């Protein structure tokens, strides 16, 4: 169906953006790419509303776009503007990207085989959602900068939304998504207000 092809293409674009996030060391591009990724996730939810007529999808899409694509991106750009430089002090980003590509290819085969064997069908939402969760985890673990780690957290939230559209009831998914966004904004507020004066403009050296 045309609807399924559109959603699959959007999910593929989300995963492609996730590769860019892993392979990018400069702060501004990675923050804006996260905004683009979250916007695509939100538009997937809006498209599901158009195709199904369920208002919960529209609420979810608006929440993701407003909180992750705009609010969190704005807060991150405010954090890096003119204070912490524009590049994370990390080496071997290309090597990390290669490791990430290998890991994603491996897990794609495993997830595809598991779905086709256990459920007798392959659902793109489950595949893309699981891969996005993996990408967010990889970004948080492999990078030492606070900004990339926060973006990894947001990427995991996006993966939960994709994964949840298949497994979780919509009201619960909306509440969980909003809660995670609020927690993300609280963490951002703490780092911007409390941490930056204490670390003498070395935000990229923080770990955790």
Image: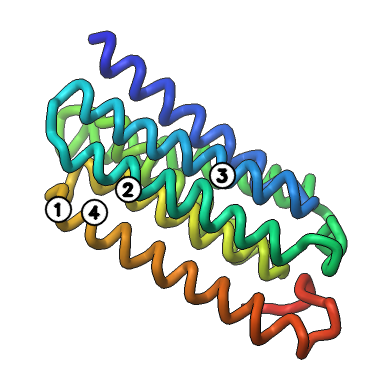
Residue 8 sits in quarter? top left
Image location (x, y in percent) of residue 190: 58, 81
Relative depth, front residue between 15 and 67: 67
For disc 1, the marked residue is 171
For disc 3, the marked residue is 35
For the C terminus, the quadrant is bottom right
For the N terminus, the quadrant is top left
Q: Is residue 201 left or right of residue 113?
A: right
Image location (x, y in percent) of residue 110: 38, 41
Q: CA distance from mark 1 to mark 2?
A: 12 Å
**Do the numbered discs 2 and 3 sit on residues whose CB atoms are within 8 Å?**
no
Q: Residue at x 49, y 68 (%)?
A: 185
For marks 2 and 4, give the one nearer the viewer. 4
**Do the numbered discs 3 and 4 sit on residues whose CB atoms are within 8 Å?**
no
Q: Is residue 54 left or right of residue 91?
A: left
Q: Residue at x 64, y 60 (%)?
A: 76
Q: CA distance from mark 3 to mark 1?
A: 24 Å
Q: CA distance from mark 3 to mark 4?
A: 19 Å
**Do the numbered discs 2 and 4 sit on residues whose CB atoms are within 8 Å?**
no
For disc 2, the marked residue is 161
For marks 1 and 2, give the one nearer the viewer. 1
Instruction: First in sequence, mark 3 or 1: give its number.
Output: 3
Q: Is residue 137 left or right of residue 161?
A: right
Q: Secondary structure at mark 1?
A: helix
For disc 4, the marked residue is 174
Residue 94 sits in quarter? top right
- Label disc, if present, on residue 106 of the rendered structure: none
Number of other residues with Cα within 10 Å of mark 2, as a class: few under 14, some 14 to 19, many 20 or more: many
Q: Residue at x 52, y 75 (%)?
A: 187
Image location (x, y in percent) of residue 9: 42, 21
């Amino acid at each position: 169906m045309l609807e399924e092809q559109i959603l699959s293409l959007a999910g593929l674009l989300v995963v492609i953006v996730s590769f860019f996030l892993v392979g990018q060391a400069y702060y501004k591009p990675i923050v804006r790419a996260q905004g683009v990724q979250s916007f695509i996730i939100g538009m997937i939810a809006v498209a599901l509303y158009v195709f199904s007529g369920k208002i919960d999808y529209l609420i979810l899409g608006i929440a993701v776009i407003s909180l992750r694509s705009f609010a969190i991106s704005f807060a991150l750009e405010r954090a890096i503007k003119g204070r912490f430089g524009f590049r994370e002090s990390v080496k071997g980003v290309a090597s990390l990207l290669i490791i990430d590509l290998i890991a994603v290819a491996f897990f794609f085969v495993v997830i595809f085989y598991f779905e086709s064997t256990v459920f007798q069908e392959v659902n793109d939402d489950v595949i893309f959602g699981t891969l996005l969760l993996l990408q967010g985890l990889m970004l948080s673990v492999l990078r030492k900068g606070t900004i990339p780690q926060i973006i990894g957290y947001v990427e995991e939230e996006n993966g939960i939304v994709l994964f949840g559209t298949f497994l979780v009831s919509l009201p619960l998914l909306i509440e969980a998504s909003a809660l995670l966004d609020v927690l993300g904004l609280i963490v951002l507020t703490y780092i911007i207000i409390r941490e930056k004066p204490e670390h003498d403009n070395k935000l990229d050296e923080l770990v955790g």
